[in-house]
Image (tube, helix red, strand yellow):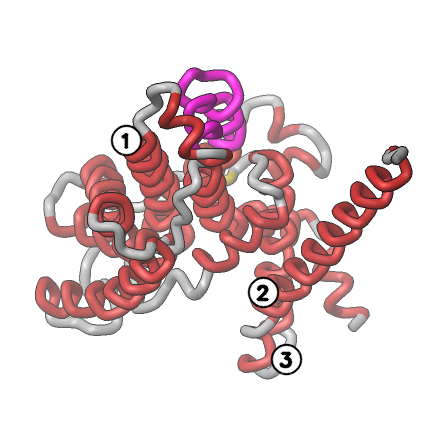
């Protein structure tokens, strides 16, 4: 335990927390946007898988390198988000079941496409994929302790944390954000004042798809260089928990994503210190369950507090 604690209290561990939190943060923000519009995006796992595959294959097979790889990653994830919007909003399929079905489709579909295009069912190790570079921030990199943690991260990591501000601005400082929140709060009331509910929800799901796709692109073009089967490994579901714990607000959601990133980074350290692999892999998921239990308990406690306050103010 002392050896593990010595690893945790290091600059390298803090650096890795930001790194592994990146895909979770992208997907959690995607969930925030969709849920605010009342259109749950349960297909985050599938969106990230397709984006990761398209990014790796796009950069390797098109000869376009990083640019076309990223564009195709966004397009691949956006395709799944568009299917979810079409089935859930226009064909009136239950959107939760549609999301689950698309996740299952992605789990098998990515392997099928990988085999059809490369002849390999495990990954793109035989291909040379492009990856996003790390970025050293002038002046910041020279700050003791903080510099080595913040500077030198992958470009997409900086984009993920910038998107926290961008999503906050979208939701609370734009007309689209106002309409999006109105639709999520009460779609019938929104429709009564002329707001196109389906169009707003569709827009939210597509924006959600783009954010989750960026997280998938990071996995195959930043975290690793190439695609491996099932590489998302439940991060889409962890992101749903992070958004719930953050109460669908961008900044608290970011903090929740960092908590899950901490446990993900911790699991890597435990694996390096001889802890059984099967036990190590449960770490992030146990943290997810524990986080949701704490979130639910706090929510019930707040609701009881409000109810008690209302009863005290009531005077017959």
- Helix, strand or loop at label 3? It is loop
- Helix, strand or loop at label 2? It is helix
**In front of the other: 64 or 193:** 193
- Seen at 61% across and 22% down, the residue is 139
Residue count near mark 2 (Cα–Cα under 10 Å), binned few <14, some 14–19, many ≥20 = many
Rendered-image quadrant of the C terminus: top right
Residue 305 in sight in this render: yes
Residue 135 in sight in this render: no
Q: Which mark is residue 275?
A: 3
Q: Give the residue pinned by disc 2.
A: 284
Query: How many numbered discs?
Result: 3
For the record, the magenta segment spans: 162-183
Quadrant position of residue 114: bottom left
Task: Work out whether 302 lies above or below 265.
Answer: above
Task: Work out whether 117 lies above or below 152.
Answer: below
The percent position of residue 156, horizontal first and vertical second, equals: 42, 38
Between discs 1 and 3, the one toward the N terminus: 1
Rendered-image quadrant of the N terminus: bottom right
Quadrant position of residue 263: bottom right
Q: Give the residue pinned by disc 1.
A: 199
| Cα distance between the residues tagged 1 and 3 | 50 Å
| Cα distance between the residues tagged 2 and 3 | 15 Å
Query: Which of pointers 1 and 3 indicates the residue nearer the eye?
Result: 1
**In front of the other: 230 or 39:** 39
On whether residue 172 falls in the magenta region, the answer is: yes
- Seen at 74% across and 57% down, the residue is 297
Q: Which mark is residue 134?
A: none
- Seen at 19% across and 38% down, the residue is 68
């Amino acid at each position: 335990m002392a050896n593990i604690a010595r690893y945790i209290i290091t600059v390298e561990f803090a650096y890795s927390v930001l790194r592994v939190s990146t895909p979770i943060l992208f997907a959690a923000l995607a969930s925030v946007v969709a849920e605010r519009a009342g259109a749950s995006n349960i297909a985050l796992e599938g969106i990230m898988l397709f984006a990761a595959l398209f990014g790796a294959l796009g950069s390797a097979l098109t000869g376009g390198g990083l640019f076309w790889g990223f564009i195709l990653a966004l397009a691949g994830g956006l395709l799944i988000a568009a299917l979810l919007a079409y089935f859930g909003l226009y064909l009136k399929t239950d959107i939760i079941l549609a999301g689950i079905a698309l996740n299952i489709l992605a789990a098998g579909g990515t392997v099928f496409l990988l085999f059809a295009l490369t002849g390999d069912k495990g990954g793109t190790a035989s291909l040379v994929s492009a990856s996003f570079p790390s970025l050293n921030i002038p002046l910041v990199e020279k700050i003791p302790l903080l510099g080595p943690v913040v500077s030198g991260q992958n470009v997409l990591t900086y984009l993920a944390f910038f998107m926290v501000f961008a999503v906050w601005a979208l939701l609370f400082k734009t007309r689209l954000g106002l309409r999006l929140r109105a639709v999520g709060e009460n779609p019938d009331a929104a429709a009564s004042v002329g707001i196109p509910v389906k169009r707003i929800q569709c827009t939210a799901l597509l924006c959600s798809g783009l954010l989750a796709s960026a997280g998938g692109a990071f996995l195959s073009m930043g975290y690793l260089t190439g695609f491996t089967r099932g590489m998302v490994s439940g991060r889409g579901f962890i992101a749903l928990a992070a958004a719930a714990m953050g109460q669908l607000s961008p900044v608290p959601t970011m903090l929740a994503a960092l908590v899950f990133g901490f446990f993900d980074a911790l699991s890597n350290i435990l694996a390096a210190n001889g802890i059984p692999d099967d036990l190590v892999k449960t770490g992030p998921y146990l943290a997810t369950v524990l986080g949701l239990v704490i979130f639910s308990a706090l929510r019930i406690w707040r609701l009881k507090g409000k109810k008690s306050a209302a009863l005290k103010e009531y005077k017959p």
